[in-house]
Amino acid sequence: MEPTAFIEKVLRFISDFIYLYPLLMSFVWIIGGGIFYWKLERKRDTPPILPTYPFLSILIPCHNEEKTIESTVKHLLGQNYPSFEIIAIDDGSTDRTPDIITNLAKQYSSVRNVFLSENRGKAAALTMGCVAARGEYVVTIDADAMLDKDALRWIVWHFIHFPRVGAVTGNPRVANRTTLLAKIQVGEYSTIIGLIKRTQRILGKVLTVSGVIAAFRISALYDVGFWDDMMLTEDIDITWKLEKHFWDVRYEPKALCWVLVPETIKGLWKQRLRWARGGIEVILKHSDIWTSWRQRRLWPIYMEYIASVIWAYSFLILILLWLIQSSLKVSLPVQILPPVPKWSGSVLGLVCLIQFAASLCMERKYEKGLLKYYFWVIWYPICYWVINAITVVVALPATLLKKKGTTATWESPDRGIS
């Protein structure tokens, strides 16, 4: 085969993959999410009445959270659950956070504090919180989160009725909606994140609990050695550690949690780059699942993530070649087709719209007026595919070149435009 013909064949394959991969996954998510909703979600409307109400420890790791920590703690005190404590873990903050949580502990007997002298990262903060916890189960939330008053009852139901449940993740909802980026994320959290978690739960393995709202059985955390403070995304890593030890990880869409999301390009970039680097770290760390037949149920999740990385590189390579050819008028040995050809792009766009509509219909029972964000979420493929693809491309070499033994410290993320 001549080199030109071979290159053209490779480019055609890349073009087809760019189109077919998201198309296939859209169908998988629509079908899987629909099955989950029909079997496990649609008839459960009232919070469960539990046979017992075990004591819970709510952990709030915080680093420079003076703007949000007080409102988060006070909101938690209104939970529709009879027995819990709140443990605020200050991870070497340099602002007023230590003073605020100290005053809160003086005002409310159910609030306790843990102080770390230096920034050791969210994973280390959570582990220290578990050392201080008195509950059989711990609920971890971010310092800007507003937990729905019935969320704890929905979460604890899983632990009480199923002894092999090691973790339950909740349903994050976007609280700030003043910019285009935030409005698109309202749709993203419902139509992408929520739908994927529903599908993964039906398939049996969840890629990750949501770092902003998750609950754990303390005995399961002991079994896997708690969080790894070397990992950039402690939520993905702890999920894989639990599932590799055959603990069940579940998604509870009725455990609602309102969070603040980035509303600037810079903030969004930093968030998605951290997600991408953390995901790649976890994939590299847990590649040993391929040596054990007992871990076979994790294989599809692993392969889907690898496919998403390949897709990101393919997408950007084809975009660059197409821009070189069409904009710079540079002559290339073969004709470069647009990253998504017109007719197939129309089909993919239609399927995306169907996916968004299906997921918004599932989620609208949790939020009135959610369907009005349908207009904004249609911009997701244009805005976020490019951002997410670039972050993955940047994250891979950055992760591979990361110095081993480096603790994953953190900083307060973009909480939106105040």
Image (tube, helix red, strand yellow):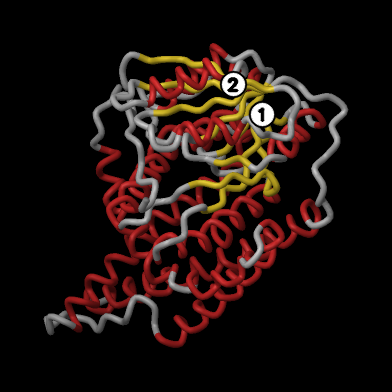
Q: How packed is label 1: few (under 14 Cα within 10 Å), some, or many (20 or more)?
A: many
Q: Does the residue at mark 2 contact the one at mark 1 (Cβ under 8 Å)?
A: yes
The circle on residue 221 is: 2
The circle on residue 166 is: 1
Q: Nearer the viewer, residue 259 or 168?
A: 259
Q: Position of residue 154 (x, y in %)?
A: 74, 39
Q: Nearer the viewer, residue 64 or 186?
A: 64
- Give above or below for 303 relative to 288: below
Q: Position of residue 256 (x, y in %)?
A: 64, 46
Instruction: Tell me how far mark 2 sits from mark 1, CA to CA.
Output: 8 Å
Q: Nearer the viewer, residue 157 or 152?
A: 152
- Residue, x 71% and y 36% (percent of image)? 155
* Mark 1 residue type: Gly
- Residue, x 57% and y 72% (percent of image)? 372
- Give above or below for 261 relative to 112: below
Residue 50, image quadrant: top right
Q: Position of residue 133 (x, y in %)?
A: 59, 15
* Mark 2 residue type: Leu
Q: How packed is label 2: few (under 14 Cα within 10 Å), some, or many (20 or more)?
A: many
